[in-house]
Image: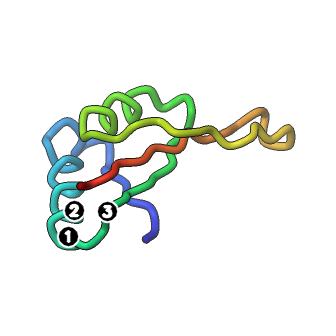
């Protein structure tokens, strides 16, 4: 699946949570969800953790991109 993005003017309205819950319900056979988010996007970190995701890793910082890297999150469904 590609990226999902909620425009700033629609954030904090529960749309992101509804999207995640919809995907989990629509694909009940998926037992492990993974995603990446920019390391400096602190609001995303809080949101994903609130939705049950756990940080499991980080990509290596890229010198050619000014040290930019991503955090990897995972949610296991039992």
Q: Is residue 64 above or below residue 49?
A: below
Q: How is the image coloured?
A: rainbow
The extreme right residue here reads 64
Q: Which mark is residue 28?
A: 1
Inter-mark Cα distance, 2 to 3: 9 Å
Residue displayed at 25% across by 73% down? 29
Q: Quadrant of residue 58?
A: top right
Asked if the residue under mark 2 is in contact with the one under mark 1, i.e. CB atoms within 8 Å, the reply is yes
Report x, y in % for residue 69: 67, 39
Residue displayed at 17% across by 72% down? 26
Residue displayed at 21% across by 57% down? 19
Q: Quadrant of the C terminus?
A: bottom left
Where is mark 2, residue-wise? Answer: 24
How crowded pointer 1 is (Cα within 10 Å; few <14, some 14-19, many 20+) is rated as few
How crowded pointer 2 is (Cα within 10 Å; few <14, some 14-19, many 20+) is rated as some
Q: Helix, strand, or loop for circle 2?
A: helix
How crowded pointer 3 is (Cα within 10 Å; few <14, some 14-19, many 20+) is rated as few
Report x, y in % for residue 47: 30, 34
Q: Nearer the viewer, mark 2 or mark 3?
A: 3
Q: Which mark is residue 39?
A: none
Q: Helix, strand, or loop for circle 3?
A: loop
Q: Is residue 50 above or below residue 26?
A: above
Inter-mark Cα distance, 1 to 2: 6 Å
Where is mark 3, residue-wise? Answer: 31
Q: Helix, strand, or loop for circle 1?
A: loop
Report x, y in % for residue 20: 24, 55
Report x, y in % for residue 76: 33, 51
Inter-mark Cα distance, 1 to 3: 8 Å
């Amino acid at each position: 699946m590609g990226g999902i993005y909620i425009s700033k003017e629609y954030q904090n309205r529960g749309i992101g949570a509804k999207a995640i819950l919809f995907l989990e319900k629509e694909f009940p056979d998926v037992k492990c969800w993974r995603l990446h988010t920019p390391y400096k996007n602190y609001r995303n970190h809080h949101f994903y953790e609130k939705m049950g995701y756990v940080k499991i890793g980080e990509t290596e910082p890229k010198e050619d991109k000014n040290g930019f890297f991503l955090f990897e999150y995972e949610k296991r469904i039992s």
